[in-house]
């Protein structure tokens, strides 16, 4: 799960940065505010890469997805990109957990086969 979720979060890191560049063009927004918000979100996305397997990591990831969607009120394209990344986040969590379960079952089967020895067949 960690690999899939981290890949999604790193993709979001870049999208947030590019959204900041677009938001800078809005005369109604202070450049310092734009970079404070975008910079914070970028740092959170990188930190979440290491926290995704810890308790609350997935929930914090969902909070980032909601923030990404809500950023569409400033940069309208982010409504679409936020929804895309929310779907990717769901897929990363869902399929990542399935892959982890399959790996665990495979490791158990290998351990059971190794402990039985060659005469088990």
Image (cartoon, rainbow, N blue to C red):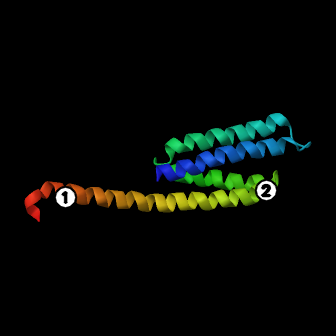
Quarter of the image containing the C terminus? bottom left
Residue 109 percent location from the top left of the image: 24, 60
- Is label 2 in contact with label 1 (beta carbons under 8 Å)? no
| Camera-side residue of 63 and 3 | 3
Q: Is residue 27 above or below residue 87?
A: above
Q: Is residue 11 left or right of residue 4?
A: right
Name of the residue lying farthest toward the bottom: 121
Q: Which residue is mark 1?
A: 112
Q: Residue at x 28, y 55 (%)?
A: 107
Name of the residue lying farthest toward the right: 27
Q: Residue at x 81, y 56 (%)?
A: 76
Q: Based on the displayed image, in which of its 4 quarters is residue 79 positioned?
A: bottom right
Q: Residues within 10 Å of mark 2 (few under 14, many from 20)?
A: some
Q: Is residue 12 above or below residue 108?
A: above
Residue 60 percent location from the top left of the image: 57, 50
Q: Residue at x 70, y 52 (%)?
A: 68
Q: Residues within 10 Å of mark 1 (few under 14, many from 20)?
A: few
Q: Is residue 113 above or below residue 51?
A: below
Q: Is residue 85 left or right of residue 101?
A: right
**Numbered mark located on residue 31 in the image:** none
Q: What's the distance in space between the residues labelled 2 and 1, CA to CA? A: 52 Å
Q: Based on the displayed image, in which of its 4 quarters is residue 80 positioned?
A: bottom right
Q: Residue at x 92, y 42 (%)?
A: 27
Can I make out residue 56 in this image?
no
| Camera-side residue of 106 and 24 | 106
Q: Secondary structure at mark 2?
A: helix
Can I make out residue 28 in this image?
yes
Name of the residue lying farthest toward the left: 119
Q: Which residue is mark 2?
A: 77
| Camera-side residue of 50 and 111 | 111
Residue 21 percent location from the top left of the image: 80, 41
Name of the residue lying farthest toward the top: 32
């Amino acid at each position: 799960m960690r690999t899939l979720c981290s890949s999604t979060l790193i993709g979001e890191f870049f999208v947030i940065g590019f959204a900041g560049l677009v938001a800078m063009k809005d005369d109604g927004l202070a450049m310092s505010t734009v970079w404070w918000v975008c910079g914070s979100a970028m740092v959170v996305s990188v930190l979440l890469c290491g926290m995704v397997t810890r308790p609350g990591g997935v929930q914090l990831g969902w909070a980032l997805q909601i923030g990404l969607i809500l950023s569409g009120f400033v940069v309208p394209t982010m409504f679409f990109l936020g929804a895309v990344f929310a779907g990717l986040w769901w897929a990363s969590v869902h399929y990542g957990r399935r892959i982890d379960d399959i790996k665990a079952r495979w490791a158990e089967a290998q351990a059971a086969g190794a402990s039985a020895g060659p005469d088990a067949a």
